[in-house]
Image (tube, rainbow, N blue to C red):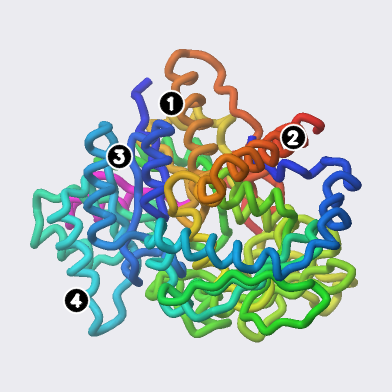
Amino acid sequence: MVRPELVCPAGTPAALRAAVDAGADAVYCGFQNATNARNFAGLNFTLREMQEGVTYAHERGARVLLAVNTFPPAGQTPAWKQAIEDGVRLGVDAIIVADIGVARHVACAYPQQRLHLSVQAGASSPEAIRYYCREFGVKRVVLPRILTVPEIKAIHDEIPCEIEAFIFGNIGMMAEGRCSLTNYATGVSTNMDGVCSPAHAVRYEEDTRRNLTARLGVFTIDRFSCGEQAGYPTICKGRYCAAGRKSPYYAFEEPVSLNLSSLLPDLMRAGVSALKIEGRQRSRAYVHAVVSAYRKAVDDCLAGRPPLLPDLLALTEGHRETRGAFGGRRWR
Amino acid sequence: MMNSAENNFPARLQYLPLSLLAPLPLFTLQPLLQRVITHLSRRRPELFARFGAHTRKTFLIDPLNLPFVFLLRLDPRRPQLLARRREHPMAHDARIAGTFLTFLDMVDGRLDGDALFFNRDLVIEGDTEAVVCLRNAIDDMEGSVADDVADFFGLPGRAALFVLRRIKRNSGELR
């Protein structure tokens, strides 16, 4: 069994250090602008912070993967080119891209730079992945969270690059890189502005009985009764009234987090080279807890022991976990 | 495991400060609070870097088990931390409510804000983006802000923080 790389999120320098100290093999992060898909308020890295982060990680044997994984709108490619130039200059170990124009720019301008294909590219077939490998020299593909383990194994056998698969964190049912629900509700694009449910458009109201209403733009997307677990304010995980329904229901997906600890050995046997933890928007406490837990679980697998993971339920959305499509579940 | 430490802490004990501290005249607290926030802003200038356009925003920090609330304004030129009685209406851009120990754990970097929100241990109202900025700014500060504040008060401050953390740990053990 090949030792997989544990790829961990960092939304801030403190989270980067927490991830590296907890045993991350690689950390992924982005700059403070729309060039990455976690362009949230107060999050991400300045140039100086990125430089310090790269140094910190490299001194401890960890790699830094720079996410430049959004789609530049027409006429705005300079910001994406600048992010790539900065990343190359600062010595990041790989650049994660989604847009074919951005991929081509990296391949042409920096042919020695290692290139990863973001989950945002939505490449889920051997044909699509081989295209990216052939045209842009992509070395690793981050697979969308819509595949079963046998399907991942089948893809692995047909492509010339490494596979990175999500193992923990927030999970949506939308085809990644294609979802326009936030754009519809707020005018801000997840795929081009890099932010799903921008905080400026989110409002929470709790009444005197502790019932919580969550709004995105002008839309009420959920109402949680007192004591009921809440979720992220994303449209895809909201509850809605509809004709023929007696009560509000989850029209798309329920608030739930991915946790594939039980599938780690299967994923590793399927040829997955890198195991990815979601959560650049989360705190350093989350990063430390999840990375530590998965570091031990992966090491257990490699030693032939069953992976024993501490309870991470307290960190999950809605206090619920799923194996999603990886465990054979079909989306609605 | 990170979880709200006082989840199962006996409710009567958790809310004891609400009545114990009720007679405390706030004018005695005010000079201390202003010195604390001035000290913190000098010691942790990086706190302001993640605020962007939100440096003029006013946060109502509402520790539900204390008889007063705090008004926080993180303007780098003139940071403010004021104590006010909860029943007095106060203009603010965003309100963050939770128990005092929850806030302590958050500034210590021991609890995840999203998890607290999912668990309904944290209430957020008003300008969500400003709150997210505040959360990210505090979370990016290395070490413990609580330690900084305790150090500011010297031995009594460190002793008080030790006792609070002890209470927090014991409350976790009660689960």
Name the spot of residue A264 as percent of width and height, x first: 51, 30
Q: Say if mark 3 contacts mark 2, CB within 8 Å.
A: no
User: Which residue in the rendered view is the most extreme toward the front?
Assistant: B28
Say whether disc 1 or disc 4 marks the residue closer to the N-terminus.
4
Same chain under badges 1 and 2? The reply is no
Instruction: Determine the CA span between mark 4 and mark 2.
Output: 51 Å
Instruction: Determine the CA span between mark 1 and mark 2.
Output: 39 Å
**SS label for mark 2:** helix
Of residues A120 and B146, the one nearer the viewer is: B146
Q: How crowded is mark 3: few (under 14 residues within 10 Å), some or many (20 or more)?
A: some
- Which numbered tag is attached to residue B172? 2
- Which numbered tag is attached to residue A44? none
Q: Residues within 10 Å of mark 4 (few under 14, many from 20)?
A: few
The magenta-colored residue range is A126-146
Task: State yes or no: residue B147 in magenta.
Answer: no
Same chain under badges 3 and 4? The reply is yes
Which chain letter matches label 4? A
Residue placed at 82% from the left, 70% from the top?
A248
User: Quadrant where the N terminus of chain A lies?
Assistant: top left
Identify the residue under disc 3.
A162
Identify the residue under disc 1.
A269
Say whether disc 3 or disc 4 marks the residue closer to the N-terminus.
4
Residue placed at 49% from the left, 51% from the top?
A279
Same chain under badges 3 and 1? The reply is yes
Q: What residue type is labelled 1?
A: Arg
Which chain letter matches label 1? A
Instruction: Determine the CA span between mark 3 and mark 4.
Output: 29 Å
Instruction: Determine the CA span between mark 3 and mark 1.
Output: 13 Å
Which chain letter matches label 2? B
